[in-house]
Image (tube, grey):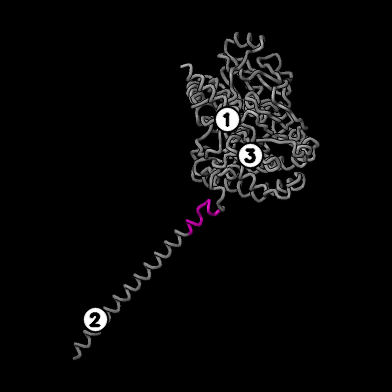
Amino acid sequence: MLLLIFMTTLVSLLTVDNVKSANILVAMPVSFYSHHSGVQPVLHALAARGHNVTILSPYPQKKPVANITDIIVPNFFQNFIAKNAPKDDFLSFHGITSIMFAIWELGANTLGVALQDDQIQKLIKSNDDTKFDLIMAETLFANELFVAFGHKFKAPVVNLFPALLFPSGAYLTGNDFPPSYVPVVRTSFSDRMTFWERVQNTFFYWWDIFIGHVYYLKLQENLLQKYFVYPGSENRPPLEDMLRNTSLTLVDLHFSIGYPTPMHKNIVPYGGGYLKAPGKLPKDLQDLMDNAREGIIYLSFGSGTTLSSLRPELQRAVLSALSKVKQTVLMRLQEPTLPQEFRNKNIIVRDWFPQAAILAHPNCKLFITHCGLHGIMEAVQYAVPMVATPLIADQHYNSLFLESAGIAYRVPPQEISEQKLSLAIRTVLTDPKYKENIKTRSAIFKDNPMDMMDNAIYWIEYVIRHKGAPHLRPAVLDLYWYQRLMLDVIAFYLLLIFLIVYILVKIIRLFFKLITWMCCSKVSKNKKSKKE
């Protein structure tokens, strides 16, 4: 028995040692905080396993972490949004085409500024003494051109994505999401679409792929040629070819929170792997929640939401509805100040709450959420039903799933009113099906073949061990678009059917001609016989 334990331990240590000294570059200089926070636990786990992790981003570690080196750059995303995004209306970006182009323009504009940053240029132009064994980057979300670090450092690339892939991104990984039943993330469809919804979904699916290819990647290619210059870059493959050759895509997603979607082995979900023990509540919140006889309602619209970023009528509708409930309301807003008429009521506003610890408390009865994935996963983890109020982008997609799963009451932003929100809150609190459904979903969420974080680490190290793991790359990536769509095969069969029909028609016509000739010959012979 002791020998078996010794041999098992030895094999484990040897396996770790194969990749223990890997140098990993994480390039996320143009990224939202929510995206960065989702991947941060993965990076910490890699560092804890002995890897040297260098992170290029605007978000430094809150305290020093062994084996992690931060290269800090300005927050290009937030700076651009602060200057250009609407200040008072989240709804202006809810349409699919406006969201699509907003993200593309955001990526192109911020990258044009970011690539001129001294820290980024220093890394691009670094000499041969700087070596990395693996590159990790959001190469399918506004950071596409950073895939070129893989070419510069001759290292495999792992793509990071904060949600279910967009069609254009899935296409570049060799994954096709059938638009007949997989809704495009930017739409407001479920997987049970009507005929006309399938028509629209198919159009948006191919629109995303086509425009992404002919418009957006061209913008990125131009920036790549202009700013991403280093010795050997003149021999660099086109951007699209480099994107097609990424080794792995990690998606911050869990199969239980989304519609069933086919994925190749080169896509690895890790959503929820970072959800560990929720931690303790501060004493004031612990006392408040313990003594809340009617329970607690928790509201959060995301880390960057301010009350003033909502329309005045939405502000009033939300506050009026919440001020009339029996429960104590904990509201997270970046502007922790309420209008005078709503102060000293049952609403407590702060710019930060320990969200996981609040949701984990048995007195938390309801979560009002903008439907960000991390918040949803925490609510499902701790079995807290939701009122879903999506504001932008994939939040609409997420909210539809929550509604279809029976774990949330959905209130689209265009429909938010005091009456509608009050009805939603009352329904979720009083209808037992929401609590029962969220308990069932929570059990599914927790039932994994292995820890999601361990799974992500395994596949990252797998890519390092197997020199990029090219065997995971689907052969579909080497096909022309018409071959991928089977258009050549369809054309062949159509031509074959046409030829068969053509030949049959010819045979039938010949047959009738023969019959006609035989009949005419017989009639002619009969006439001659009668004359004789």
- Residue at mark 1: 456
Q: CA distance from mark 2 to mark 1?
A: 85 Å
Residue at point 76%, 42% (across, down): 112
Out of 140 and 198, give the one closest to the viewer.
140
Kind of residue indicated by mark 3 = Pro
Q: Earlier in the sequence, mark 2 or mark 1?
A: 1
Q: Nearer the viewer, mark 2 or mark 3?
A: 3
Secondary structure of the residue carrying tag 2 is: helix
Above/below status of 375 relative to 231: above
Count every numbered label the image shows and give the total. 3
Q: Residue furthest bottom?
A: 532
Above/below status of 282 relative to 42: above
Image quadrant where residue 520 sits = bottom left
How far across and down, in percent of the image, does residue 333 sit?
70, 23
* Disc 2 packing (10 Å; few <14; some 14–19; many ≥20): few
Q: Earlier in the sequence, mark 3 or mark 1?
A: 3
> Which residues make up the magenta segment?
481-491
Out of 384 and 391, give the one closest to the viewer.
384
* Disc 1 packing (10 Å; few <14; some 14–19; many ≥20): many
Based on the picture, tell me whether residue 488 belongs to the magenta stretch.
yes
Kind of residue indicated by mark 2 = Lys
Residue at point 57%, 12% (across, down): 294
